[in-house]
Image (cartoon, coloured by chain):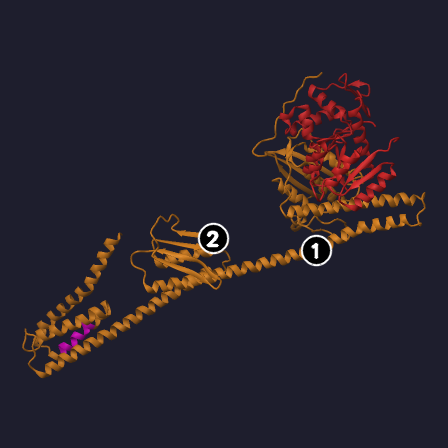
Chain colours: A red, B orange
Amino acid sequence: MSNTVHILVIDDEPQILRAMRTILTEKQFKVTVASRGEEGLALAAANEPDLIILDLGLPDMDGVEVCTRLREWTQIPIIILSVRDSERDKVAALDKGADDYLTKPFGIEELLARVRVALRHSARVQGTQSKVVRAGRLTIDLAWHIVKLDEEEVKLTGTEHKLLAYLATNHGRVLTHQNILSNVWGPADADHTEYLRVYMRQLRKKLEADPERPQYILTEPGIGYRFIADE
Amino acid sequence: MNSANMRSSSLLSRFQRYLLPIVCISAVTAVFFILRAVLDTTLIALLYLIPLGMITAYWGLGPGISSALLTFLVFNYFFIEPYYLLAVHQPSDVVILIVFLIVAVVISQLVARAQAGLALATTREREATQLYELSVALAGLHNDHAIAEILAKHVQAISQGEAVELNLVGAQPFVFHLPENNSLTRTPELIVPIQAARGILGQIRLWRAVPAISSGERRLLQTFASQGALALERAALAQAESRARVLEESDKLKSAILSSVSHELRTPLSTIKAAASSLRGKEVGWDSPARGELIAAIDDEADHLNILVGNLLDMSRIESGALKPKREWNILSEIVGSVLARMKHSAEEHQIEVEVSDNLPLVPVDYVQMQQVFTNLLSNSLKYAPVNTTICIRAYAEEEMIRVQVTNQGPQVPPEHLERIFDKFYRTTAADRVTGTGLGLSICKGIVEAHGGHIWAENLTSGLAFNFTLPLIWDGAPPPRLPIDMETE
């Protein structure tokens, strides 16, 4: 990257900070670290980093709270770190405006992929939205509402199309059940996960080669879904 | 019978106790009077002693003494000259009369004492029998409630009271009524505390107005109460002992867990340490193929370590009851599919068949926990079933539930161990053959049961099957039927 991207890592574990600093610096990122929530908030306000990696288990304040406070004034992408079995916290943080999550322990490719997606998404939000999303054999024309598998048009119902369009617009990002439901069906239906299950199954049957092992629409267990597009 | 009636009948019986002796003496006197011509005065005096003794034996000391006095007067009146006067002419007759009175009174007293002794002995014997029966009934009881019940029943049996109530105080207060719907509102006639070394354990409350509770009964009931106290103490001691034993067992289990866990954790750690240190040193060249292998080993073993720690966390959550499924309506085939996709590499040497229709009803389960169940059942099957055999996952809807079966062609489990394989750290084979914490199946059991389902294993003609059920009803609601729009754009 030409301009050095600045990443703020907020985590209370020195080993994690050490590893992150080493790895991210190696990858040509500029890294600032904070070990407490308040310190992180202060650094975020002072330095305006391009991305924040935030651990949910901080000693002084709840990670979800940090998310909420950050979102009061900035749209800096936030990637949360958390341990297994804390789906509730992850979902809460994602619904409070975090962009993505990683479960500890994680591989570095995973971390870098999340960082890339988050940065690209924030660039997309600021800049112009690409009208066509490509994923493997799949082409989704968001402007013309056309979905093609190879060169063949796929017939989708209205709701299916709306759902796929929402996923594709946010490709690469994890979307919580509630997020998808309230954006596609409306806030009144935000708890009807069963709608999602059924429509996702229909979409996968129409789009995926093997609907049980999807390539494009991935399930994030206990959290939501993620649409994987070509880079 | 109401109490007024009872009181009059008791009056009547008291009246009879004094009336009947008078009748008796009169009859005997009539007979003697007829035979007065042939009977000597001294002989009559002697003969009078017979009915007197019998009266005392029958009706007790009071009637006996009063009959003796009456006889003394009658004897004087009818048989001692001058007749029909309470006067004595002959000095010898005075002696006869005095001797008669003394003998009559002494005999009455002796007979009465013998009678009282006999009655006491009988009562004592009955009490001893009742006490014996109570202690036999209480022996071996280790439950406070059962002890209270038995005690109340025995109190009721000996006292014939209107009602008996047994109150136990302490950590788990308990009241036992006999009869069950005790409607008496007045204070009980007798309250006996159940007193033990560690304080008052409760009380026996007895309602019986008539006949009044005698001091003997009171004493007996107190003995009953102390028997009850002993039984309760014994039960408490037995409970304390079994608690101590459970603690000891769980202590043993904890050390088993610790040793198993440290062994299991150390294995991947050793690999990671060895690989990392050799990468750090100069033994492995930058472009040596060993380098890639070592790095892969570190990566794999770290994942393995992560799974082990995850299992331990799951287990502790299950044990502490903190494993609460976050239920949502899910598609079972999707869960199975995601598990298979994730386990693709470890399942390479087996054939996996899946018969889970995506037309099954939606199941109300925690997606992540259900993944865990399938992952553990599959890895167990992969571990024990020989390579190139088939592992099959089936699911079908039964009435109000889904039944899932995972079968493999691995070794059978001895029938008596089929339940125990879901215990923590249970292994069918020697621990060194197969690695793992020995927690996988018990985690499955914990998760399935937290969902309200049931899990069991069965031997097949060639292999082993894990079965589990999941209820389809969630909060009283069946799986939703969805509005599916069929229009196309």
Q: Which residue is mark 2?
A: B173
**Is residue B45 inside the magenta stretch?**
yes
Badge number at residue B256: 1
Q: What percent of the width, then of the height, locates residue A170?
A: 76, 26
Tell me if residue B142 comes above or below residue B382 in the rendering: below
Residue A211 in the figure: left or right of residue B327? right
Magenta stretch, overall SS: helix
Judged from the image, the secondary structure of the residue bearing numbered disc 2 is loop
Q: What percent of the width, then of the height, locates residue A127?
A: 80, 23
Q: Specify few, some or many for label 2: CA neighbours under 10 Å numbering under 14, 14-19, or 20 or more.
A: few
Q: Tell me which numbered mark, 2 or 1, is placed earlier along the sequence.
A: 2
Q: Chain of mark 1?
A: B
- Along the line of sight, which residue is nearer the eye, B301 or A201? B301
Q: What's the amino acid at mark 2?
A: Pro
Q: What percent of the width, then of the height, locates residue A149?
A: 79, 21
Residue at position x 62%, y 42% in the image: B449
Q: What is the number of callouts on the image?
A: 2
> For residue B307, which quarter of the picture?
top right
Residue at position x 64%, y 28% in the image: A190
Q: Nearer the viewer, mark 2 or mark 1?
A: 2
Residue B220 in the figure: left or right of residue B146? left
